[in-house]
Image (cartoon, helix red, strand yellow):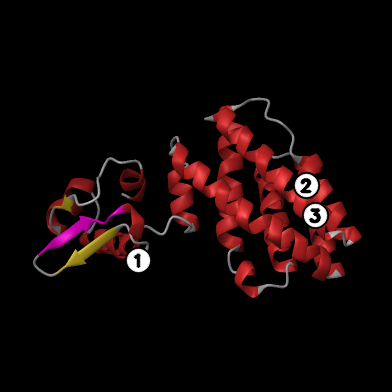
Amino acid sequence: MGIAILSGVHKPGEHFAGEIEQSAAMGVSRTAYREAIRILTAKGLLESKPKAGTHVTQRKRWNLLDPDMLAWMFMGTPDEQFIRDLFELRNLLEPAAAKLAAERRTAEQLGVMQAAIADMRAYGLATTEGQAADQRFHATLLAASGNQALATLASSVGAAVQWTTNFKQRANRNPRDPLPEHIAVCDAIKAGNAAQAFGAMETLIDLAFKDMAFAL
């Protein structure tokens, strides 16, 4: 149901039939259908009101950074404007986080990022293990910023990294290897060079966006 809403099968304002009819049409129990409605309502996709029933909300109310929502968005071909918005958001957040990480990271956090790069090299980004390492790198970088507000976005940024990488791997048999850019970011953070870390992360995100545009 979430994928159908995000892909435009169900438009904002569209009304859903009653619980009995919908659960029967989908071949699920009323309890399962009710739970699905509850989850989608919590994510901002649906709204239920007494007597008015259940309908799809306007897009501005959708929690598009929710990890489940990001996964559903990339089940098909994602909306190009949303991809642009997502990378613009990353470009606002991650270079600043890299700059702070160069000034504040701990030895343990640096070790996690270096190990993540080693795993990306060993497994490759076409594998689940490699993609998990990529997520770990970005999540640790946000934590290394020493800014709790930035760190709370780790799951959303990690999901964005995972699903854009996954999509690029599906769309292109020989995608560009982004490992050198990750190494450049990590080296700058290790050296404590804030300006270099900022610039290296900007380059990483810019090239990742171009890869995504090519895949689309």
User: Which mark is first along the chain, 2 or 1?
Assistant: 1
Could you say where residue 46 lies in the image, as x and y percent from the top left? 27, 59
Q: Residues within 10 Å of mark 1 (few under 14, many from 20)?
A: few
Amino acid type assigned to the residue bearing label 2 in the image: His
Q: Residues within 10 Å of mark 3 (few under 14, many from 20)?
A: many
Q: Nearer the viewer, mark 3 or mark 2?
A: 3
Over which residues does the magenta segment extend?
52-58
Label 2 sits on residue: 182
User: Could you tell me if residue 147 is visible in this image?
Assistant: yes
Residue found farthest to the front: 195
| Residue at image point 12% right, 70% down | 50
| Structural distance between the alpha carbons of marks 3 and 2 | 10 Å
User: Which mark is first along the chain, 2 or 3?
Assistant: 2
Q: Foreground: 90 or 165? A: 90
The reply to whether callout 3 and callout 2 are in contact (CB within 8 Å) is no
Q: Residues within 10 Å of mark 2 (few under 14, many from 20)?
A: many
Vertical relation: 61 (above or below) 9: below
User: Could you tell me if residue 119 is visible in this image?
Assistant: no
| Structural distance between the alpha carbons of marks 3 and 1 | 37 Å
* Magenta span contains residue 54: yes
Amino acid type assigned to the residue bearing label 3 in the image: Ala
| Residue at image point 69% right, 47% down | 129
Label 1 sits on residue: 42
Label 3 sits on residue: 197
Q: Nearer the viewer, mark 3 or mark 1?
A: 3
| Residue at image point 73% right, 67% down | 145
Vertical relation: 12 (above or below) 63: above
| Structural distance between the alpha carbons of marks 1 and 2 | 35 Å
